[in-house]
Image: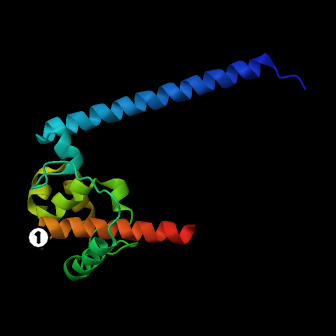
């Protein structure tokens, strides 16, 4: 079977066009993020990690089951009236939240909801979607970190059941 060189040329052109359009799209998204940061007065770090007491990236390290259990208890007490895992409720579905937000962002949202809603465009967008501001539950840094570990445990349980 002989391959027509025109088809090879067309395939190469389509591949090149697809790669260049993805690159252009990525550049537009980067410019959009930069302009959003400038418009909001936030730094690039704040855009990614939120506004609040957590001012450095949070390194999660090895999974801590004991911390996750504490986080589950805190979540049940302070968060479950508005948030569920695996379903939209009063607030956003928190399943896979660590795929969408950094640990620092999540912790800042828990510890500084009013500041986040006032200054952060993503938090403002969520408020527009859910029409309910996140209540301040007076979560400490340690409690927020435990809840983040609980979110890790939920995703760990899902991946364990798939295998």
Residue positioned 23% across, 76% down in the render: 79
In the rendered view, would you say 86 is above or below 117?
below
Residue pointed to by mark 1: 136
Quarter of the image that includes the C terminus = bottom right
Rendering coords of residue 56 (x, y %): 16, 48
From the viewer's perspective, is 159 left or right of 42?
right
Task: Please give left or right for residue 143 compared with residue 53 in the image.
Answer: right
Considering depth in this image, is 50 or 159 the residue closer to the camera? 159
Against 40, residue 15 (above or below) is above
Q: Residues within 10 Å of mark 1 (few under 14, many from 20)?
A: few
Residue 77 position by quadrant = bottom left
Quadrant containing the N terminus is top right
User: 87 and 130: which one is in front?
Assistant: 87
Res 133 seen here: no
Determine the residue positioned at 23% across, 59% down: 106
User: Dividing the picture into quarters, in which one does residue 53 lie?
Assistant: bottom left
Residue 142 visible from this viewpoint: yes
Residue at horizontal 17 percent and vertical 70 percent from the top: 143
Viewer-side residue, 8 vs 159: 159
Name the secondary structure under disc 1: loop
Q: In this orientation, which residue lies closer to the viewer: 16 or 144?
A: 144
Here the colouring is rainbow
Which x, y percent locates residue 20? 49, 25
Residue 74 picture location, percent across and down: 22, 78
Marks counted in the figure total 1
Residue under the image location 28 percent in, 53 percent down: 102
Residue 98: quadrant of the picture: bottom left
């Amino acid at each position: 079977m002989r391959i027509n060189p025109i088809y090879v040329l067309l395939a190469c052109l389509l591949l090149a066009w697809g790669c260049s359009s993805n690159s252009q799209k990525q550049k537009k998204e980067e410019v959009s993020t930069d302009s959003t940061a400038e418009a909001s007065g936030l730094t690039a770090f704040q855009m990614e990690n939120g506004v609040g007491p957590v001012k450095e990236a949070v390194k999660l390290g090895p999974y801590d089951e004991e911390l996750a259990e504490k986080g589950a208890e805190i979540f049940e007490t302070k968060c479950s009236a508005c948030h569920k895992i695996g379903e939209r409720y009063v607030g956003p579905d928190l399943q896979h939240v660590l795929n969408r937000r950094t640990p620092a962002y999540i912790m800042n949202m828990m510890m500084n909801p009013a500041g986040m809603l006032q200054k952060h465009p993503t938090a403002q967008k969520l408020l527009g979607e859910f029409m309910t501001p996140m209540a301040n539950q007076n979560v400490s840094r340690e409690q927020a970190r435990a809840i983040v570990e609980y979110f890790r445990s939920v995703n760990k349980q899902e991946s364990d059941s798939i295998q």
